[in-house]
Amino acid sequence: MRYRISDIETLRRMARLSISQQEFQLSGVEVDEGFREREAYQQGHLTDAPDFDLYDQMLDDEEDHHG
């Protein structure tokens, strides 16, 4: 499934909730550097970049409101 958050306040509430429930933890992640050799990576590494224009616009709008 795919979800789109179109309101920055929703994202902030989710972050606050996560932090308040002490679920927010930054931890190191082990990465198998051999992933570049996998067929799935090689087939998908040249796909189109995601379009983040909507989120960039939200941030610009937010700055205009507060700036």
Image: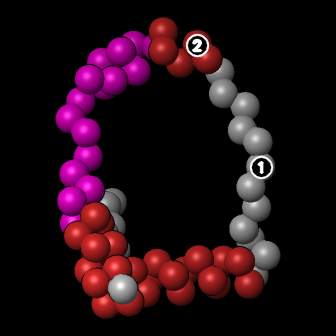
Instruction: Please tell me in which quadrant of the rendered image residue 32 appears.
Output: top right
Closer to viewer: mark 1 or mark 2:
1
Q: Which residues are magenta?
A: 38-54
Q: How busy is the neighbourhood of tag 1: few (under 14 within 10 Å), some, or many (20 plus)?
A: few
The image quadrant where one finds the N terminus is: bottom left
Q: Secondary structure at mark 2?
A: helix
Circle 1 residue: 27
Give the residue drawn at x 40%, y 21%: 41
Give the residue drawn at x 46%, y 78%: 11
Q: Is residue 33 above or below residue 30?
A: above
Please indicate whether residue 42 sits to the left or right of residue 11 in the image. left
Q: Is residue 7 above or below residue 39?
A: below
Residue 59 seen in the current view: yes
The image quadrant where one finds the C terminus is: bottom left
In x, y percent, where is residue 55? 29, 66
Q: Earlier in the sequence, mark 1 or mark 2?
A: 1
Q: Secondary structure at mark 1?
A: loop
Q: Is residue 39 above or below residue 59?
A: above
In x, y percent, where is residue 65? 31, 90
Q: Nearer the viewer, residue 66 or 26?
A: 66
In x, y percent, where is residue 37? 48, 9
Q: Nearer the viewer, residue 42 or 59?
A: 59
Residue farthest to the top, as pictured: 37
**As shown in the figure, which amino acid type bears the numbered disc 2?**
Gly
Give the residue drawn at x 58%, y 13%: 34
The tag on residue 34 is 2
Q: How busy is the neighbourhood of tag 2: few (under 14 within 10 Å), some, or many (20 plus)?
A: few
Instruction: Please tell me in which quadrant of the rendered image residue 6 appears.
Output: bottom left
Q: Nearer the viewer, residue 65 or 52?
A: 65
Answer whether labels 1 and 2 touch (C-beta < 8 Å).
no
